[in-house]
Structures are given as C-alpha cells and as structure tokens.
Image (cartoon, grey):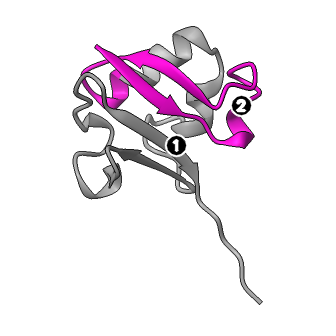
Amino acid sequence: MSINVRIPTILRTYTQDQSQVSAEGETLTEVLDSLESDFPGIKARVVDDEGKLRRFVNIYVAEEDVRFSDGLQTATPSGSQVSIIPAVAGGC
C-alpha cells in the first residue's frame, strides 16, 4: 500500500530535496521504517532513541494529528497522506 509522505524543508537533505516521497506500511511505524530504508537517517529525526515521536515534531495522517489518535500505531490506509511538520515556537 502506497502512502504519500510530505517532507518538511529541514528534512529534505535526507530525501534528495524531494518535498513528497512514497512509502509503504499499514501503520505510521511501518511507514517510518519504509522511509528509513529508502532514506537512511530520516527516522532518527522524527522519533527518539526510545522509539517515541520527538517532542517538536508533529505528524498528521489524513489531516489528523497522530498524538490525538493512536500515535505511531495510527493506521495508514493505502492512498493516505502523511505530513511531517516541525513544531514552530516563538514569542516576543
């Protein structure tokens, strides 16, 4: 099952500057593993050493924040859009 993954600018060095790539997997974990096999090093930028989503990385599957669904076990049906979005912080 092919999943379309949108890659933020900061991670495009891993994807040869591609803003969107294809991955395979029935869950977000499997999609991230697929990305890692095609683009070594990218997974470590998204999950920590314990395999948890990094604090300042947001991932959406079909416009739903995975932190409010099943996390890394969120289902990724064929044709899903996955968006990796770095959190933005700031202030005055």
- For label 1, the residue is 84
Q: Which residue occupies the foreground of this view, 77 or 92?
A: 77
Left or right of 50, for residue 20: right
Q: Which residue occupies the foreground of this view, 85 or 80?
A: 80
Asked whether residue 84 is drawn in magenta, I would say no
Q: What kind of residue is marked 2?
A: Arg
Left or right of 54, for residue 9: right
Bin the neighbour count of mark 2 within 10 Å (Cα to Cα): few under 14, some 14-19, many 20 and up.
Answer: some
Q: Position of residue 46 (x, y in %)?
A: 55, 38
Task: Please report the residue visible at 37 percent of the width from the left and 23 percent of the height from the top.
Answer: 3
Gap in Å between the C-alphas at discs 1 and 2?
11 Å
Within the image, what quadrant is residue 18 found in? top right
Q: Is residue 9 above or below residue 36?
A: below
Which SS class for mark 1?
A: strand
Left or right of 31, for residue 41: right
Q: Position of residue 30 (x, y in %)?
A: 35, 20
Within the image, what quadrant is residue 45 found in? top right
- For label 2, the residue is 12
Left or right of 45, for residue 76: left
Task: Please report the residue visible at 57 percent of the width from the left and 10 percent of the height from the top.
Answer: 38
Q: Earlier in the sequence, mark 1 or mark 2?
A: 2
State the quadrant of the C terminus. bottom right
Task: Please report the residue visible at 22 percent of the width from the left and 33 percent of the height from the top.
Answer: 75
Within the image, what quadrant is residue 56 found in? bottom right
Q: Is residue 13 above or below residue 86?
A: above
View extreme (top): residue: 37
User: Where are the magenta residues, as a range?
Assistant: 1-30
Which SS class for mark 2?
A: loop
Q: What kind of residue is marked 1?
A: Ile
